[in-house]
Image (cartoon, rainbow, N blue to C red):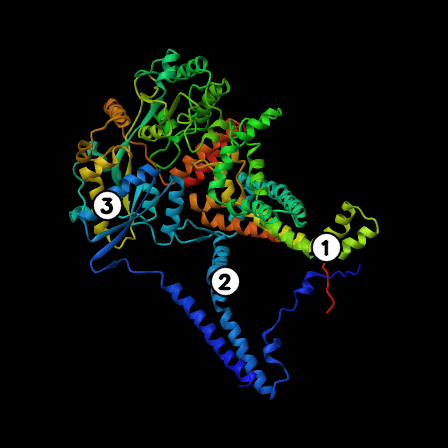
Amino acid sequence: MSARRWTARARGLRGAAAGLVALGLLATGCGGDGGSSSGGKVTIRYAWWGAKDRSVMIKKTVKLFEKKHPNITVKTDFAEYADFWSKFNTQAAGGNAPDVFQNSYAFLRKYGEKNLLLDLNKQVKEGNLNLKGFRNGLEKSGDIDGKLYGVPVGANTFGFFYNPAAFKKAGVTVKDGWTWDDFFAAAKKVRKSDGTLYGSSDNAGVMYLYDLYLRQHGKAFFTEDKKLGFTKDDLKQWWNTWQQHSKAGELVPGKKTEQAKPKATISANLSAAEFTWDNFLVRFAAETDTPLELGPLPTTDGKKTAQYLSSLMLSGSARTQHPKEVAQLIDFMTHDPEVGKIMGYNRGIPATTAQYEAYKPSGVDAKIAAYEKSVAGKLEPITPHPAGTDVAEAAFLRTYTDVTVGQSSVDKAVDQFFDEAESALGS
Amino acid sequence: MTRTTTRAAERSAAPPRPETRKGAAPDAPGAAAGRRSGRRETLAGYLFLTPWCIGILLLTLGPMLVSLYLAFTDYTLFDSPRWVGFKNFQEMFEDDRWWTSVEVTLKYVLIGTPLKLLAALGVALLLVKPRKGQGFYRSAFYAPSLIGASVSIGIVWRAIFNDDAIVDKSMSLFGWDVGGWIGDPDWALPTLITLTVWQFGAPMVIFLAGLKQVPRELYEAAEMDGAGAWRRFRSITLPMISPVLFFNLLLELIHSFQVFTSAVVLAGSGTNTGGPGDSLLVYGWYLYEQGFRNLRMGYAAAMAWMLMLGIGLVTAVLFKTQRGWVHYEEDAR
């Protein structure tokens, strides 16, 4: 056998091999997309944001659902809040959003306007989704201009958190109808009596808190016509007040707040008070051993806290292939008493009476229940959240943080915030 | 010393073509048969290239063209793109945060890269001499580069630079009391830079390889002439490894312009981006925020192309200057 013949053969083989490689690559490239339903079995995807404890609970509820609906398989996925939305945006842009996902009131308009949310009204009519049995008419909050874009799973309201031991030591009592002046005076006393704790966290950059302050003055963060509901001078006054107390050393300095992340400064044992959503008591209990209490929000006129109920929701994707199964999952997650027992108050107080009554709160959950009961009579309608709310919220916090870490002045930060928020709201 | 200086371009000007490989020697009986088999080889070559071609067309060139188009549009991901001409580019120059991101990134690149290369070269010089446990030391110095890009190490870094943690405590013993590095807008970036410099493993390995290539006899000759250690380093080592140095410099520069993960993790999670007072707002992060958080894909695409122009410019300048300081050993052919 001559060497040349052999190389010729080898050359032929080489061509064939190259062809095979190319073909194989193409085949694997196209083979990724499997069908999601076969033989009557349907697979839907369910995604949410939250910490690990929430995921453990939700996975249990999903198992329960699959047991009762053997023809439906639910694939789950979760991430922390900010990452969740980045991922969601990417998936949705590729026409591949999860079939069912956790949502909140702040996002309904944003994604509704982009035709990403399934209008669940049709499923209600067909009997796959029950809208009866919700507490306080909560189901209405998912209705945006006649379209049902979300179904609430849990309700929460904004609250004042404090460290009762530190407050007692300082001789301060938290009572209904106390004012912002009382609050700042309390922070000062706590700071004086306690060598390590600051009187309060610096929450002036939290959009929801400023919203409540504005509401106490007959305004709101956003107006019905999708604009900011306050002036630059309003905001300067709010931030300057907080800065004045911060400079007096009564509030947690910006540097320490940055460093404590992802914990809040109260659960990092830096401060004795904090403003945030009441269901955070569950999270704080996991982050710190210090017992914390929920108390009434400071007022302006001695009466009005201007609180409202907000809620976490479940929404469906407009692109889903299985709207019926999507509705069945949402229905199960909002109404099933067993689910109510598993979830507790992790996503706020259950939205339906069935789940509310199935779960007997104890420990921190009991505190949340008592708190919501105490404010139930004072609740007002929610502030409208136009598309762009999330961008405005992030800009509000960031520009104020620039002030607290000494990178910006209040005046500069206010200008920067207005620039960014107005462009996000499209005005 | 016989050394001729040539340009890199000449060196890489003639990639071996399939026809001139040994398999299709021109002395084959019958020129036509030779040409035919040559053509078949070419075909096989291209066939072997197809996976790569498909990859670059579908995954790199295609998306790049689309992104170039998007850079001239308003695009929210969900609505169809709307042509706006140069508006995005104009806006960048009026955007304070864009300027901040440029400033932060330039500081990061211009301080971080030289420090990292210095560390890599220094350690490579120590490790090139044969000694006991050499393998262990090399692995130990390389290890941070393996884990350095991971999220967990960013979290560890956050923890050790805290105000009551090891770095701050030990520094304050020397009267240098920052009081928490991560939360301080003046110290957050230096912390990020130390994290990067610490990951000098990859350039170190390349330097090691380069150092081993330097002919021993050059050093022997120099020593005979009475050259000291510094002189030998200046006149032999540095010129001899200058191509490696150039390669490392280029690679690290391009790489650090695109920094993202470490800055994000170091700043900690939360809705508030950019670290304390935007002091960690590197270019890639701002681009990501505009694109995926604010859904301004057109603006983000325009930013990406500005970054590419910037990196291209820096690379071009480096290639221009290499004539002055990079020496290529041309082996006699």
Residue A423 in percent (x, y) is at 45, 40
Residue type pointed to by label 1 = Met
Q: Secondary structure at mark 2?
A: helix
Mark 1: few/some/many CA within 10 Å (<14, 14-19, 20+): many
Q: Which residue is mark 3?
A: A63
Q: Is residue B11 left or right of residue B38?
A: right
Q: Nearer the viewer, mark 2 or mark 3?
A: 3
Mark 2–mark 3 Cα distance, whole angstroms, equals: 43 Å
Residue A70 in percent (x, y) is at 19, 51
The residue located at (41%, 68%) in the rendering is: A24
Mark 3: few/some/many CA within 10 Å (<14, 14-19, 20+): few
Mark 2: few/some/many CA within 10 Å (<14, 14-19, 20+): few
Q: Secondary structure at mark 3?
A: helix
The residue located at (50%, 17%) in the rendering is: A248
Residue type pointed to by label 2 = Ile
Q: Which residue is mark 2?
A: B56
Query: Which label sits on residue B240?
Result: 1
Discs 2 and 3 carry the same chain letter: no
